[in-house]
Image (spheres, grey):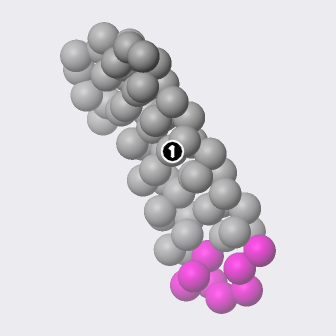
Amino acid sequence: MSAVDESGGRARQLREKAQELRQAAERADDPEQRRRLQEKADRLQQQSEQVSGMGSGDIYPLE
């Protein structure tokens, strides 16, 4: 398995987890818990974009 395949798989896992957290946030009754879940989902989404960019050979980090 190449590094690109591995990073693509990792990026996909992060995106899936972020989506799960967003769904959990939508179901959360507590506003504070909803906010925390959404923030964690946002961080995972950013990580997936960074991993995806590194796997494609992009040398510049996403901002």
Q: Which residue is mark 1?
A: 14
Q: Quadrant of the C terminus?
A: top left
In magenta, the rendered stretch is 27-34
Residue 28 is a magenta residue: yes
Mark 1 surroundings within 10 Å by alpha-carbon count, few (fewer than 14), some (14 through 19), many (20 or more): many
Query: Relative to 14, does residue 27 appear above or below in the rendering?
Result: below
Residue 14, given in percent of the width and then of the height, sits at: 51, 44
Which residue is located at x 61 percent, y 76 percent? 34
Image position of 42 with respect to 36: above or below: above
How would you classify the magenta stretch by its main secondary structure? Answer: helix
Residue 15 in which image quadrant: top right
Quadrant location of residue 31? bottom right
Left or right: residue 61 versus residue 56 is left
Q: Position of residue 32 (x, y in %)?
A: 55, 84
Q: Secondary structure at mark 1?
A: helix
Residue at screen point 71% across, 79% down: 28
Q: On the rendered structure, is 10 left or right of 17? A: left
Tell me if 44 is positioned left or right of 13 in this view. left
